[in-house]
C-alpha cells in the first residue's frame, strides 16, 4: 500500500462539502465511504524505511518495554470502492526483534518466548475488512506465532497519502491490536515478591505503516 499525490505532501483526498455541524459518523455497513478513495485501489507494499511494526508490554508492573521487528515482507491490496475486498499479508522475521537491549533481544527470540530457531516467521493474513467510521477500518485475520494460529482484529486509521519527491505514491495507516500472549504459547513468566507477574500477559501490537504503490503487472 503506497499512496502519493503529486500535488501535495501528506494530504487526504478532498471530501464533499459538509454542513457546519456534521452528523455523527455511522458504523459498520452504514459508514460513509468517500468516493475519492477509489483512486487508491491497487497493490501496495510496506516501506520498511518509513514504517514501524512494533509491540509493547508492561514489565515488572511499573514500566513498559517497547520493541519492533526490523525485517519483514508484505503484500497489500487496498480496494477503495469496496474495503471488504482489501487484503493484507505480512511476514515478520522473528529474529529481527529490537528492544534496544541486546541481552533482552536474545531472551525474546529464545526458547522462553518466540523461539526464532524453530519458528523463523510470524505471519498475519487478513480475512474480512470493514469500514467502521470516517477513515477507520477494522481488519479481521489470522496471526501465527510459534506455529499457533489464532484470530485477531486490527483497527486501522487512514492517515493520508502523498506523492514523494521521487514520484512514489505513498499512503499512511496506523493500526493497533491487543492480544493475550499465552494464547500463542508465550507462557514464560516470573512472579514478583510483591505479587503479580514480571511480564504482563497483555501484549499490544502496533502498525505504523507507510506503504508504496507497486507497479501493475504487465
Image: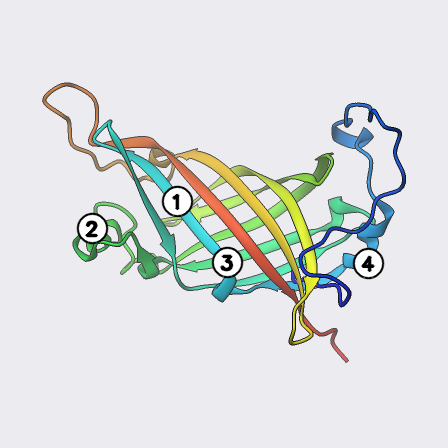
Q: Is residue 14 left or right of residue 103?
A: right
Which residue corresponds to the image point at 32% horizontal and 31% vertical from the top-left? 201
Earlier sequence position, callout 3 versus callout 4: 4
CB-based contact (under 8 Å), mark 2 and mark 4: no
Quadrant hosting residue 18: top right
Q: Residue furthest front?
A: 20
Q: Residue furthest bottom?
A: 218
In the rendered structure, find residue 104 and report the number of the disc placed on it: 2
Q: Secondary structure at mark 3?
A: loop
Q: Look at the numbered disc 1 and give the secondary structure of its residue.
A: strand
- Which residue is identified by label 1? 55
Give the Cα separation between the discs numbered 4 and 1: 32 Å
Residue position marked by numbered label 3 in the rendering? 51
Residue nearest the viewer, comparing 138 with 67? 67
Quadrant for the N terminus, please. bottom right
What x and y, as percent, mark residue 37?
80, 51
* Residue plotted at (71% across, 40% down): 135
Q: CA distance from mark 3 to mark 2?
A: 23 Å
**Which label's residue is closer to the chain start, 1 or 2?**
1
In the picture of the structure, the residue carrying the numbered disc 4 is 39
The answer to whether marks 1 and 2 mark residues whose Cβ atoms lie closer than 8 Å is no
Side (left or right) of 134 relative to 140: right
Which of label 3 and label 2 is nearer to you? 3
N-term mark: 3 or 2: 3
Circle 2 SS class? helix
Q: Earlier in the sequence, mark 4 or mark 1?
A: 4
Q: Quadrant of the rendered structure where residue 163 is?
A: bottom right
Residue 116 x %, y %: 29, 57
Q: Is residue 54 left or right of residue 207?
A: left
Q: Distance from label 2 to label 4 (Cα)?
A: 44 Å
Relative to 165, does residue 33 appear above or below in the rendering?
above
| x, y percent for residue 140 | 60, 40
Amino acid at each position: 500500500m503506497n499512496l502519493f499525490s503529486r500535488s501535495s505532501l501528506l494530504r487526504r483526498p478532498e471530501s464533499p462539502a459538509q454542513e457546519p455541524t456534521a452528523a455523527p459518523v455511522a458504523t459498520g455497513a452504514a459508514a460513509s465511504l468517500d468516493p475519492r478513495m477509489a483512486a487508491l485501489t491497487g497493490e501496495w507494499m510496506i516501506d520498511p524505511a518509513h514504517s514501524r511494526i512494533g509491540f509493547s508490554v508492561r514489565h515488572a508492573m511499573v514500566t513498559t518495554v517497547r520493541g519492533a521487528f526490523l525485517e519483514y515482507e508484505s503484500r497489500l491490496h487496498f480496494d477503495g470502492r469496496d474495503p471488504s475486498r482489501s487484503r493484507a499479508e505480512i511476514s515478520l522475521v522473528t529474529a529481527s526483534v529490537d528492544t534496544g537491549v541486546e541481552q533482552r533481544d536474545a531472551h525474546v527470540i529464545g526458547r522462553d518466548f518466540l523461539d526464532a530457531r524453530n519458528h523463523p516467521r510470524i505471519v498475519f493474513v487478513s480475512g474480512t475488512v470493514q469500514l467502521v467510521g470516517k477513515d477507520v477500518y477494522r481488519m479481521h485475520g489470522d496471526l501465527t506465532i510459534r506455529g499457533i494460529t489464532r484470530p485477531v482484529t486490527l483497527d486501522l486509521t487512514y492517515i493520508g497519502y502523498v506523492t514523494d519527491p521521487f514520484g512514489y505514491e505513498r499512503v499512511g495507516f496506523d493500526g493497533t491490536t491487543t492480544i493475550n500472549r499465552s494464547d500463542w504459547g508465550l507462557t514464560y513468566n516470573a512472579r514478583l515478591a510483591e505479587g503479580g507477574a514480571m511480564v504482563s500477559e497483555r501484549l499490544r501490537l502496533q502498525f505504523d505503516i507507510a506503504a508504496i504503490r507497486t507497479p501493475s503487472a504487465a
